[in-house]
Image (spheres, rainbow, N blue to C red):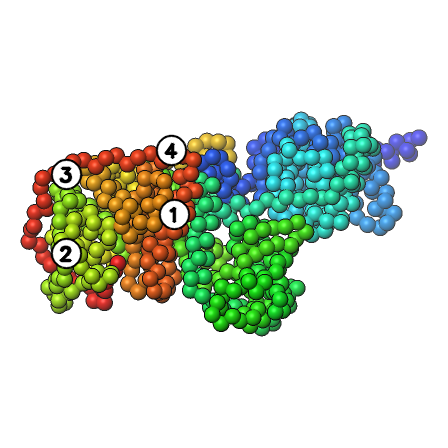
Amino acid sequence: MFGLLVLLSAAVGATAGLLLVYSTDLPQVEELERYRPSSVTELYDGQGRVIGTFALRRRVIASYDDYPEVLRNALVSIEDKDFYQHSGINLWRILGAAYRDIESGGKVQGASTLTMQLARNLFLSPDRSFYRKVQEALLAIQIERRFTKPQIFTLYANQIFLGHGAYGYQAASEFYFSKPARQLKLEEAAMLAGLPKAPQYYSPINHPERALKRRNLVLNAMLEDGKITAAQAADARSKPIALDLQKDPNSLAPHYVEEIRRYLEAKYGSDQVHEGGLRVYTSLDMDLQKSARQALLDGLAVYERRHGWHGKLVNVIAEGQKLDKYEDPDWDEEPEVNGYMHALVTQVSPAAAEVRFGQRTASLSPADVAWTMPKLKLKLPEILQTGDVVYIKVLSLDPGGKSRVSLEQDSGAEGALVAIDNATGEIKAMVGGRDFNISKFNRATQALRQVGSSFKPYVYTAVIDQGGSPDDTILDAPVTFQTASGPYSPHNYDDKFEGTITLRRALAQSRNIPALKLADRVGIRTVIDYAHRFGITANIPAYLPVALGSAEITPLEQTSAFSVFPNDGVRVAPRYIIKVTDYEGRILEENFSDIKDVVSLRTARVMTSMLREVVLHGTAAAAAKMPYPLAGKTGTTNDFTDAWFVGFSPALTCGVWIGYDEKKSLGAKETGAHAALPIWMQFMTIALAGKDPGEFPAAPAPLNTAVAEKKVDTPDVAPGDGELH
């Protein structure tokens, strides 16, 4: 007996000593009270819908009540049946696991409770050793003493890795099923509960068969524990794994989201943006953004078809790749009806060309490609070859993976669209290019492009603001300006002259000679000063052809400037962000409209009436059929390198630009009215549908004064400047 007591004392002393050694460098559990895991920064549109996220790890913090009982039961049944009874460790499970490991010659593993897993994930390394296991148990006991079971469950559920970059069950539910955890069904909750054991091995995306078996194992465990009935278990087991993978929210407005990311990182730092869980409330309208993107892509497709098939397709076979191994970046996102993407030609015959995009396939018939060579009447094998990467529009997504598509073309033509709320300056839609995956360059905010005749409103504003009237007349006739670089003899776009016409008609018909005469009369520097008042920040040289639009301005600035007209002469600076809050909901910044008077109410309303004439009877007359009060101005530059239309309703201003990134012609007759205006019309038709369009206020009675002719220095003409339309 004495010997046994000595041995027992020695064992207890040794155990106490070991526990003391193992506990000396343990983390302080008190840190959990202040612990906050990294979480995603989310961007919301004006209706509170997520339009973008920034994160190193996809994690959405949720409360205990956000996790439904069915998920809690599933997780406890498969991972830790005695979770609500034990004090952090399950001694019998540990002894049983240790015996099996000793018997098999392996390391101590398994038998971890949820609390022990939490301790390991938060404080310890993932290595499987006896030393780490003891520390894990000690930490679990401390955690149980300090926190309640719901608190421990919530910490675990927000922390655990569940595959494909998702951390926590809230983020996993949104990723795998596109819905919050509280809406999970039994079979969905069981699938998620089975992932912690090996997220990659049981991935429902990469290994659906394994995921199905694991899910059914969870259902059986729930049945054994009495959490569900036999009928419920059978019904859930009979259902396949039906994923509804979350679409990348950043794909809706990638250029817009990128602008916000750069701003936030400059102000708050990269760590705060990607790990701090900020909430950013933006001005974007998701519905208008979808309409804007669709309008721009449709408009570019129509333009491409007008100019015929260019061919010159990338061929993956010629580049040494195998057809079954090719993956296009476009395929990372689920295809959408009416969406545009690249596809791979897998087989070609005279009767049809088979294409693949992601997991889907489609056929192109000779009729589908007839537009490419209407006169030559080429056969399919003469147009497409196996291995070609083609640009398509998705017309339908049929069950079974089969789809209908149309053959389109991407020759490199680009575009930009910006829509701004007149009253608040809020940017409601922004498309910075055809494909963000191909080019991150934001043509809406970064591209300085010649604006053509869409600059002329600044000329007429200067005239009207100095007492002119839209009914004043001017002579549209040949003229030569004497400049320091020699005589300058401009001409009109149609090479014709209309004689004596009113200023209203001169602007509506975009006559070049009257615009130059007016700019010369008031002074080109005065015109440039007015452009700067409207918010144009570009450095504009004081050359007379500037009056015809040789100035280079971004679409965002040009669109924002035009909003001054329906705003009765007040400029509201454009803004992306309404409010930013931190993880705790504290407001970090709140932005309000920056307002500045630009021109008088009279001038703004007179100019609005003149720009309204552009739509009713001028170069933008195609928009006159739209049942809304609209006004705006077309713009086309030399050799048709840039096509513009910037216009507005009483509530919304929208600008559209079309062109190539390099100085390259869009083609003969590709004017602003032909290339840009249809895109603007498609967008505005949807944007204004079902809403009260309002009315433009009546223009004041004309003043009985004319612009006084004054002697001004004749501005020089920049070398190489030609005529713009």
Kind of residue indicated by mark 1: Met
Q: Residues within 10 Å of mark 4 (few under 14, many from 20)?
A: few
The Cα atoms of the two marked residues, 2 and 1, are separated by 32 Å
Task: Judge whether 511 appears above or below 271 on screen.
Answer: below
Q: Residue at x 29, y 60 (%)?
A: 637
Q: Are marks 3 and 1 in contact (CB under 8 Å)?
A: no
Q: Residues within 10 Å of mark 2 (few under 14, many from 20)?
A: few
Task: Judge whether 459 appears above or below 652 on screen.
Answer: below
The Cα atoms of the two marked residues, 2 and 4, are separated by 41 Å
Name the residue tied to disc 4. 692
Q: Residues within 10 Å of mark 1 (few under 14, many from 20)?
A: some
Label 3 sits on a secondary structure element that is: loop
Q: Residue at x 48, y 38 (%)?
A: 44
Label 1 sits on a secondary structure element that is: helix
Kind of residue indicated by mark 2: Gly
Taking the image as shown, residue 575 lies to the left or right of residue 527, namely right
Q: Position of residue 634 (x, y in %)?
A: 30, 52
The Cα atoms of the two marked residues, 2 and 3, are separated by 23 Å
Residue 163 visible in image = yes
Name the residue tied to disc 1. 681
Q: Which mark is residue 663?
A: none
Residue placed most toward the observer, 329 or 1: 329
Q: Which mark is residue 702?
A: 3
- Looking at marks 3 and 4 on the same chain, the residue that comes earlier in the sequence is marked by 4
Q: Position of residue 262 (x, y in %)?
A: 42, 48
Taking the image as shown, residue 514 lies to the left or right of residue 401, namely left
Kind of residue indicated by mark 3: Pro
Q: Residues within 10 Å of mark 3 (few under 14, many from 20)?
A: some
Label 4 sits on a secondary structure element that is: loop
